[in-house]
Image (spheres, rainbow, N blue to C red):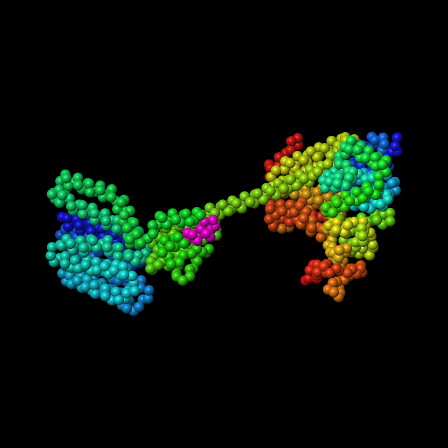
Amino acid sequence: MTEKLRVVIADDERPARSLLRAMLGNFADVNIIGEAENGSEAIELIERTRPDLALLDLQMPEVDGLGVVRLLRKDSIPLVAFVTAYDQYAVSAFELNAVDYLLKPVDPARLRETINRAQERLERAEDHATSVEAVRAAADAIESHGTAPLTRIPVRKRNQIVLVPVEQIASIIADGELLHLHTTKNEKHTISYRLRDLELRLTAAEFIRLSRGTLVNVGMIDRVTPVTGGTYVVTLTNGQELPVSRIQSRVLKDRLLRL
Amino acid sequence: MAIGVLHLVGFSTGVALYAMLLWLALADRRAGGRGESLAAVTGLLGMLWNLGSLAAYVLEQMQNTRAAELLAVASYSALGFLPAAVVHSVLRSEAKRSRATRVLILTAYAMSIAGAMLQFSATVFGVATSHTALRILTMAFVALVVPIIAVTRRRFRLERTGWIASLAIFAISGFHLSERHIGEYSWGLELLGHHASLPLAFAILFFDYRFALADLFLKRALTLVVMVTSVSLLFAAIPAITGQTDLRDAATLSMLVLVATLGMLAYPVVRSTVFSFIDRVILRRADYATVLREISRVAAEAETPERVLEGVVEHAGAAVAAIEARWSEDEHGAIGRTGVERHVAVNTAEPPRYTLVIGSLANGRRLLSDDLEMLDAAALIAARRIDALRLMQERIAQGAREQELSKLSMEAELRALRAQIQPHFLFNALNTIGSLIRSSPDKAFDTLLRLTALLRGVLRSSGPIATLEDEMKLIESYLEVERARFEERLRVEVAIPRTLLPATIPTLLLQPLVENAIKHGISPQRRGGTIAIEASADHTGDRPRLVLRVRDDGAGATDLAVRRGRREGVGLQNVEERLRVHYGDDAALSIESAPGLGTVVTATMPLQLAPHAARPLAAGE
């Protein structure tokens, strides 16, 4: 007899959680160690309890299922199965990346498969990093497809999840796989996201590229200073000074420096 | 005997002809024609002449010589004025009235007056009639021909020949009358001098047809004369054939009946022959029946009102030999180089109405009644075709409008169907029901019923207009299902006065707004939020307006996000579009939103209440 599989459930809808819990309760080899009502709670719960498997609802307020995976510390990411009512694009992305998923209303037999698969993976002690990469790749694919526009970006502040309103972001600067967000209050946050994908979802405020790796909030531009060589330096209201690339100087001139 | 009949017939025909001329001239004047008073005067003079001669002849037969003489004098005086009228008519149409023309006209009238005075003085002195006067008149008018030719040398030869001949005819009439009391009647002179002169005189008098009904007059006059002449000739020939002078002879009577019958049978043929003779030879007109057929064809082929008018005015203008012809959008359209001969109204059923503007005709012609009739018929063809085109256009436009409307409402239905039976919503609802089956079966069944009611409501919502009550029932079902899912996170407040429940709104207008409020306002919030649905009537304007408001205290959005959502969000676009289609500029949709505070969407439209009878009760209600 193997150890019981330690499972957490994250869904913002109580009926949905209770249905999953009732089904899992029928499985003798499953131990439900916690439930979360939203993404932030899920992160806290997972990092605290270190479950084997997390059943994450794809749609949750503030931090959704994909956000949970992004914001979890890499070493605390468990096996993940996403739960969704209907999202064809997400489903195909999961299948492509061999990420497990469940469709609502959940079929107990299908749930059983998910549990079995998780047990197998744990027993085979598969390379954990591979499965984390698979989930991240699926998340990237889904988000680059231009899902719901972001009004607040969830970021980690030590053990907390902070939601930064998009209109309070002054600049976003890419740094390898990470993005540094600078707010109007001159706070700095770092997230793991692709600049191109994020740009697509930032519809709540107008952003403009200053170079390949820099995005600024148009409303936060204070000064545009020409420098030798025909380019510019942009000064933001939070005091940041950012250089503009040659190509983007032309775009900037066309979009902003015309009466 | 034969000569007596000839006289009676000749004078009677003359009276009839001139009476007809007088009547038509006056009718033309009454009908708003150019009031050719000279034509009326000519008619009057001619009638007096013939009437006088007729009466004189009758009285003479009755041995009342004195009265006959007096009438004859009056009759001859009238005849004496006719050449003057001809001269006047001819010279008046000269473009520039020189002093010479005026002198000539006055001279002509002076001679006529002198002739008349001589006649009367002769009577007073006991002489029957003044032969001298008649001769002088004859000579004088013949003499007048020379200066008139000089004055009118620039005119067309045919026209000139015409009135010279007519002057000559009146002169001969005078001449033959002057000879009348000298010897026996000469047959030839009598025929030439009076009766034969009649048709010719008219043909010539109206050669430069001066008034609108002249063509009609010419046709009728010539028909009459041809009929009278041919019947008279046949009648005159009867004694020669039967050898009998007694009209009561059986053979003669039967011949008479035969002649009368032939005359009646021949009349339609004579009439149409005369009409076409006048149209083709004298007026040199195109065949108007053909012209109208051609115009009908051109009009039927035209696809726009402008093309119809162009085609019609071109053909009609060419048919009446107008130098210029065009169409205009107002009834007083002017024309460039030449003056306007006539405006012909194109009386379409609906404005804008157009006018055909016919410029002056070639060779100084005037429009006659047949021309006007043809132009009116052409205008009517144009009007009917334009009406047909407009009706067609209206139908197409209406069809397109209806199509757009039905497409939009169909899209709304489909979209609402997708929104409510949107897989996401539907599977979530089913998941909720699945969960409730275990925890609270009653609530599960209740939610199932709500879901069923919603699906039925959406599938049944036919027609573009629904009452607020119907829409709210549907929305309540929707909200119930969502409430089972979101539980205490979704709070709903409905504030709709009972009086506004029968108000009509486009079908499924509110549902997308409520759906948006849940999707963008409530569901992204951990704490959820409250949705308020409010209706009120606004009586501040000149017409009452219905104000519908969907309010949430949820996530809210920046102005930029609202603008993008309005532009790109299918739901809002559809709501705005349907408001526009139903109410035009009378409806408005406004969105106010602030991040963190929530969103208020307000739709205003004219307040229209459905009659109570139009609200069917649902089964079991």
Who's the residue at 15% across and 44% down the image? B238
Q: Position of residue B195 (x, y in %)?
A: 20, 53
Q: Position of residue B17 (x, y in %)?
A: 25, 52
Residue positioned most to the bottom: B99
Q: Quadrant of residue A241?
A: bottom right
Which corner quadrant holds the N terminus of chain A? top right
Who's the residue at 75% across and 57% down the image? A211
Whether the magenta-drawn stretch holds residue A6 is answered as no
> Taking the image as drawn, is residue B612 in sight?
no
Q: Main secondary structure of the magenta part?
A: helix
Above-or-below relation of A138 to B345? above
Who's the residue at 21% across and 49% down the image? B229
Q: Is residue B333 left or right of residue A184?
A: left
Q: Position of residue B432 (x, y in %)?
A: 76, 35
Magenta highlight range: B302-313
Q: Position of residue B449 (x, y in %)?
A: 71, 32
Q: Is residue A129 left or right of residue B295?
A: right
Along the line of sight, which residue is nearer the eye, A193 or B525?
A: A193
